[in-house]
Image (cartoon, rainbow, N blue to C red):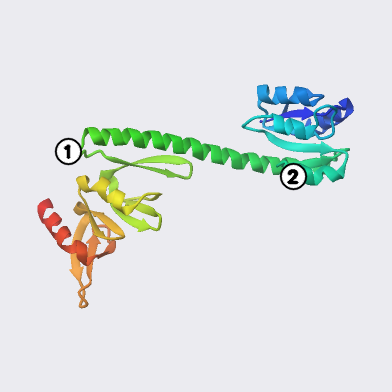
Amino acid sequence: MITTLIVDDEPLAREGLTLLLAGEEDIQIIGECSNGTEAIAAIAKQQPDLVFLDIKMPQQDGFDVLSGIGSPAPLIVFITAYDEFAVEAFDANAIDYLLKPVRRRRLQETLERIRKQLKQRDAVTQDGHLDQLLHSIAQLDLVKVSDKATQASPDARIIVRSHGQIYFLQAQDIIWVEAAGDYVTIHTSDKSHLLRDTMRNMEKRLDPHGFKRVHRSAIVKLSCVQQLKSNPNNDYHVVLKNGTTLNLGRSYKDSLYQSLLKAE
């Protein structure tokens, strides 16, 4: 529900807008105010999602109300009988303005804009919550790693956020990791995950769990390596058990050979 406050010094104007909004299932009118002082107090106490705010009121006008409310601020739709206030309304970061008398079609356009804005805000808020959660989990993992600095834990996990969800990938489920610009792509047997991280950091995290860097853009699990091969140009390749073929960088070749021999 979109909690809504109506602010206007004219009772008939408040009543008319209330009637127009009555047919909107997602609009919940939580109060009415007849002046700026009441409005500032109501916004602080009730924290509505949306405020229909008359501009021209005695003592404190709509702009005074806007400057008097704190953060987080609701979405503001200014209501005015004077079209010359329109530019000033948008300068004050109102989402829209309505001319009196308010017409149903024009109100519908405003409500659609409000619904889109709230969806975007909710998405940003959700991302923020996920970021905070990921940060907390990451910090917990760092503590665990520092407590086990000399141990190679087989259940090490990589935390990935994708499409509003959080995945916990076990190191044993990862086959190889690929550089992707400012991101890395983590490949498992059934899915690939994009993670904002560096190859250098992934190499450090996965090295204790049987992984090896084979190219500046690839890290592989040693147990998934099926074959090493070269071509007449002396270019080397790593073939994984799932059929993936990767370039083997010359500077990584000797280190990979040694690691594969130790893994036998």
> Tag 2: Cα neighbours inside 10 Å, few (<14), some, or many (≥20)?
some
Q: How many marks?
A: 2
Name which residue lies at 20% across and 53% down: 222
Residue pictured at 15% horizontal, 62% vertical: 254
The residue at the point 20 percent across, 74 percent down is 234
Q: Which residue is mark 2?
A: 90
Relative side of 122 to 145, left or right: right
Q: Which residue is mark 1?
A: 150
Mark 2: amino acid: Phe
What residue do we see at 67% from left, 24% from top? 44
Sequence order check, earlier mark of 2 and 1: 2
| 152 shown above or below 202 | above
Can residue 26 be seen in the rendering of this structure? no
Q: Secondary structure at mark 1?
A: loop
Instruction: Note whether 255 is above or below 236 in the view shown.
Output: above
Mark 2 vs mark 1, CA separation in Å: 60 Å
